[in-house]
Image (tube, helix red, strand yellow):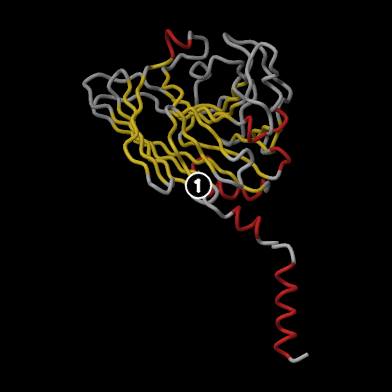
Amino acid sequence: MNRHGFSLLIALAVLSLPFAGADHAAAEEPLRLRRDQNWLVIHAPWLPGEEIRIHYMEAYCRANSTDADWVEHTKIPHQSELLEQAPDGSRLVLLDRLADGVEARHEITAQADHVRFRVVLHNPTDKASEAHWAQPCVRLAAFTGFSDVFGKDADLDDYLPQCFVFVDGQLTRMPFSPWAKEARYTPGQVWCPAHVPRTDVNPRPLSPVVPSNGLIGCFSKGETHLFATAWEPYQELFQGVARCLHSDFRIAGLQPGETKQVRGVIYLLPNQVDALLTRYREDFPEHR
């Protein structure tokens, strides 16, 4: 056999081997965004469950909310409008108009393994706004490998062992002791950081534990990936009743003519907690 024939055999043998880079190449496909009514959808074929749906925004909220009626007191009605949408799904711009006149412009950008949020809130009125905090509700049933079925017989805590916050500097899986059980509304769990009054958070069971940082997250089905999110400034961390996790952002009111900015990140990474913490510290140096 001449050298050309030998080279051809080698090439055919290599082509017949499994393509080890296929999964890696698929994982490099960037995340994509779309708007579905009041839902922000993050999609990628490599993502466990293929998509994550976020009720965005679920609510803008008043202070003194920990022991108050959610509808009658806490929620400020709002309407949302899609202003811009990149054809490739890499960027969305939304405008929320609150009932008290405040406008919140959300610029959302998707990259390979994370989504960034930049929110500019402005009060164009001559009256102070009571908008004190706000919550994007991230639904994680599909990501963690559980059903999104609700009902009186559904176990809405089934995904909890996949979820975590950081306590005493260590990743701590839910549920853990102490675990609060009593509140105006149950179940669920709220963690209030030291800089926020404990009277101004979600009216769900409020943990006595103060989280070490502003990260909350979970592991995917099979624990191949992790989800985590953080905002600056942040109001609370929350595990809810829709197989959801929240890092809810802080507004602290808006005076007439005042403008404030808030930023957030959703991380969707391979299951490497050290890498997550490195990224988080770079993105949120204020949280140190």
Give the SS element for disc 1: helix
Residue type beneath disc 1: Asp
Seen in the picture, residue 198 relative to 212 is either above or below; the reply is: above
Q: Position of residue 221 (x, y in %)?
A: 70, 37
- Seen from the viewer's position, the closer of residues 145 and 5 is 5
The N terminus lies in which quarter of the figure? bottom right
The quarter of the rendered structure image containing the C terminus is top right
Residue at point 46%, 23% (across, down): 58
Residue drawn at (25%, 19%) of the image: 127
- Residue 149 lies, in percent from the top left, at 63, 21
Compared with 242, 45 (above or below) is: below
State the residue position of label 1: 283
Q: Pick the residue in front: 281 or 13.
A: 13
- Residue 249 location, x and y as percent? 46, 30
* The quarter of the displayed image where residue 48 is located: top right
Image-based side of 134 in relation to 256, left or right = right
Q: Say which quarter of the image contains residue 7.
A: bottom right
Q: Residue furthest bottom?
A: 2
